[in-house]
Image (spheres, rainbow, N blue to C red):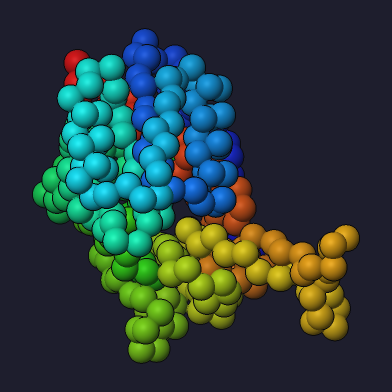
């Protein structure tokens, strides 16, 4: 049975380092329209910021906000010297393309690492302000002393916020790089690739995509997926809550129980990459603040 990598412990270590910093940065989140899931995320950000002694402000804009109005607000935050980090909450209302506005955010204040300038630096081997989830994977690898030199690393998922930047991070050192393969859910014979992986990173957004039989014995498995699925009873029927609605649980992209039997080390869901991602947001903020001094 594999060793479980404790993401909560790693997140606590990062947060403790942040608390010890002499810098006192301020983070501003911009939310356009009302979205329940986004509201939960905003509340969690605010709570985490308060725990770390970090300034936090939420800028709420109406759902009818135009592209020019949003651009103007971001540009004001770019030039506000009291603001060290800017987050654009997703999703944006229809008609507003997130990429257009992420490109406007000052790269030095882009704590989510989604400005093209910051994404491009990863390709050059410069690890600065990179996407938080990708950096969480990288942080886990470093803090758990996972040797990547010459190892076969397979990434399942090719998004611009996880799969692609993780691929580049694993190639970022000339002397310590892994040999990487980037797959996705449409990859033919996915198991052929995953079975070769010494390090398997899964960020495909599909619950239970990777079964234990698809994992190399002793591999390191980092499960980035977050999926809400029904809780089932012994007969495979949905378990209902007190309101008569199906209960749900959070699972990853990896079938955890079967993977645990084959993996050497594995991150659970929840409690793995997720807590580290939240901590990385504030680590990025601290780094952004240092760049602005």
Compared to residue 111, the image places residue 153 above or below, namely below
Name the quadrant of the C terminus.
top left
Position of 119 with respect to 131 (left or right) is left
Compared to residue 263, the image places residue 78 above or below, namely above
Name the quadrant of the N terminus.
bottom right
Compared to residue 218, the image places residue 279 above or below, namely above
In the image shown, does 122 or 181 lie closer to the viewer?
122
Residue lying at the far front in this picture: please name it. 64
Q: Residue at x 28, y 57 (%)?
A: 96
In the image shown, does 117 or 179 lie closer to the viewer?
117
In the image shown, does 83 or 206 lie closer to the viewer?
83
| Relative image position of residue 152 (x, y in whole percent) | 33, 67
Residue 13 visible in the displayed image: no
| Relative image position of residue 287 (x, y in whole percent) | 29, 27
Q: Residue at x 77, y 69 (%)?
A: 246
Compared to residue 148, the image places residue 291 above or below, namely above
| Quadrant in the rendering for residue 92 | bottom left
| Relative image position of residue 266 (x, y in whole percent) | 55, 57
Residue 84 visible in the displayed image: yes
Q: Residue at x 69, y 62 (%)?
A: 249
Q: Residue at x 57, y 64 (%)?
A: 227
Residue lying at the far left in this picture: please name it. 124
Position of 196 with respect to 110 (left or right) is right
Residue lying at the far bottom in this picture: please name it. 188
| Relative image position of residue 258 (x, y in whole percent) | 64, 72
In the image shown, does 121 or 191 lie closer to the viewer?
121
| Quadrant in the rendering for residue 112 | top left
Position of 171 with respect to 157 (left or right) is left
């Amino acid at each position: 049975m594999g060793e479980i990598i404790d993401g909560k412990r790693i997140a606590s270590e990062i947060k403790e380092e942040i608390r010890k910093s002499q810098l006192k940065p301020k983070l501003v989140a911009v939310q356009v329209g009302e979205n329940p899931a986004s509201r939960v995320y905003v509340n969690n950000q605010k709570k985490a910021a308060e725990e770390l002694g970090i300034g936090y402000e939420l800028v709420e804009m109406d759902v009818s906000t135009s592209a020019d109005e949003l651009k103007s607000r971001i540009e004001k935050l770019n030039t506000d010297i009291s603001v060290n980090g800017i987050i654009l909450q997703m999703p944006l209302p229809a008609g507003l393309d997130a990429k257009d506005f992420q490109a406007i955010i000052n790269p030095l204040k882009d704590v989510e690492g989604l400005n093209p300038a910051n994404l491009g630096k990863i390709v050059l081997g410069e690890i600065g302000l990179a996407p938080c989830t990708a950096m969480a994977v990288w942080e886990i690898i470093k803090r758990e002393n996972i040797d990547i030199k010459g190892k076969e690393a397979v990434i399942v998922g090719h998004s611009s916020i996880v799969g692609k930047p993780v691929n580049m991070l694993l190639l970022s050192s000339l002397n310590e790089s892994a040999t990487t393969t980037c797959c996705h859910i449409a990859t033919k014979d996915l198991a052929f690739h995953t079975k070769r992986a010494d390090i398997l990173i899964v960020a495909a957004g599909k619950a239970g995509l990777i079964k234990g039989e698809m994992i190399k014995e002793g591999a390191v498995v980092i499960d980035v997926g977050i999926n809400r699925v029904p809780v089932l009873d012994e007969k495979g029927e949905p378990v209902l809550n007190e309101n008569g609605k199906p209960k749900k649980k959070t699972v990853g992209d990896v079938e955890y129980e079967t993977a645990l039997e084959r993996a050497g080390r594995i991150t659970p869901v929840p409690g793995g990459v997720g807590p580290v991602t939240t901590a990385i947001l504030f680590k990025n903020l601290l780094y952004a603040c240092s760049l602005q001094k």
